[in-house]
Image: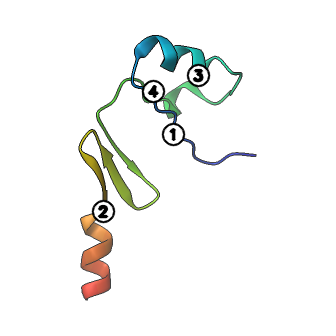
Amino acid sequence: YLDDILIYSREKSKYREHVKVGLYTKPFKYYFYTKHVEFLGFIVTLKGVIIDPVYIKAIKE
């Protein structure tokens, strides 16, 4: 059982190959070729990974 998964590849051809491994989920849960994603309390971008500011605010308060 997988709840959340990220699949990253530098090349679209490799990405398609990795996705075809056989994972199945509901179509509305897919995000393809995105440059920004919120994942498990982090924001993942092409520049790197940061903690979601919402969580930082909650900790400070």
Q: Which residue is mark 3?
A: 19
Amino acid identity at mark 2? Asp
Classify 28 as above or below 38: above
Question: Given contact means CB atoms under 8 Å apart, are the residues at marks 4 and 1 in contact?
Answer: no
On residue 49, which mark appears? none
Q: CA distance from mark 3 to mark 2?
A: 26 Å
| Image quadrant where residue 31 sits | top left
First-in-chain label (2 vs 1): 1
Question: Given contact means CB atoms under 8 Å apart, are the residues at marks 2 and 4 in contact?
Answer: no
- Please tell me whether mark 4 sits on a helix, a strand or a loop: loop
Quadrant containing the C terminus in the rendered view: bottom left
Q: Which residue is mark 4?
A: 9
On residue 52, which mark appears? 2
Classify 46 as above or below 18: below
At label 4, counting other C-alpha atoms closer than 10 Å, the crowd grade (few under 14, some 14-19, many 20 or more) is few
- Please tell me whether mark 3 sits on a helix, a strand or a loop: helix
Q: CA distance from mark 2 to mark 4?
A: 23 Å
What residue lies at 33% left-to-right and 72% top-to-bottom? 55
What residue lies at 28% left-to-right and 68% top-to-bottom? 54
Residue 25, given in percent of the width and then of the height, sits at 64, 30
Amino acid identity at mark 1? Leu
Q: Is residue 32 left or right of residue 17?
A: left
First-in-chain label (1 vs 3): 1
Classify 21 as above or below 40: above
Q: Which residue is mark 1?
A: 6
Front tag of 3 and 2: 3
Q: How is this picture coloured?
A: rainbow
| Image quadrant where residue 17 sits | top right
| Image quadrant where residue 42 sits | bottom left
First-in-chain label (4 vs 3): 4
Q: Nearer the viewer, residue 47 or 38?
A: 47
